[in-house]
Amino acid sequence: MKENLIADKTYNFAIKIVLLSKKLCAQNEYVLSRQILKSGTSIGANVEEAIGGISKKDFRAKMSISYKEARETNYWLRILKDTNYI
């Protein structure tokens, strides 16, 4: 299979998000942990769906969802940073 830089980077990012979520749960921060886990892993999941899309329109739609999830994840990361969780 051909290497895909975006798929690789979003996969590695998702791994880091899972580890962060586990750390937050260990600190009894379940709400933010769940939010960051959902949006942070959704980025790569939607990239994978886009790669397997059946049309260019489908590809663009899935990549657009990935972009929105990335923005949401950035929001949660900013909150975690500003509240000194990370």
Image (cartoon, grey):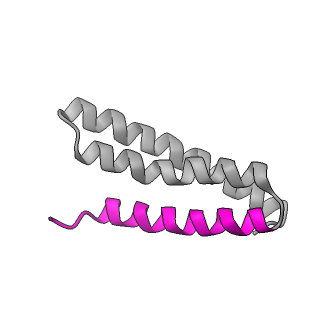
Q: Position of residue 66 (x, y in %)?
A: 43, 44
**Residue lying at 19% horizontally and 35% vertically, measured from the top left:** 56
Residue 52 x/y as whole percent = 22, 44
Depth check: give the residue in front, 30 or 46: 30
Identify the residue shown where x is 51% and y is 53%: 41
Residue lying furthest left: 1
- Which quadrant is home to the C terminus? bottom right
Give the total of numbered labels.
0
Left or right of 26 on screen, residue 76: left
Q: Quadrant of residue 11?
A: bottom left
In percent of width and height, residue 83 lies at 85, 60
The quarter of the picture where residue 85 lies is bottom right
Pick the front one: 35 or 62: 35
- Image height of 40 relative to 18, above or below: above
User: Quadrant of residue 60 in the image?
Assistant: top left
**Is 8 one of the magenta-colored residues?**
yes
Does residue 11 show up magenta in the picture? yes
Where residue 20 appears, as percent x and y from the top left, is 65, 67
- Please name the residue shown 39% across and 45% down the image: 46
**In the image, 83: left or right of 63?**
right
Quarter of the image that includes the N terminus: bottom left
Q: Which residues are magenta?
A: 1-26
Question: From the viewer's perspective, is residue 39 above or below residue 26?
Answer: above
Tell me the chief SS of the magenta region.
helix
Query: In the current view of this chain or complex, which residue is farthest to the top?
Result: 57
* Residue 73 higher or lower than 15, as above or below: above
Left or right: 2 as drawn, with respect to 37: left
Q: Residue at x 30, y 65 (%)?
A: 5
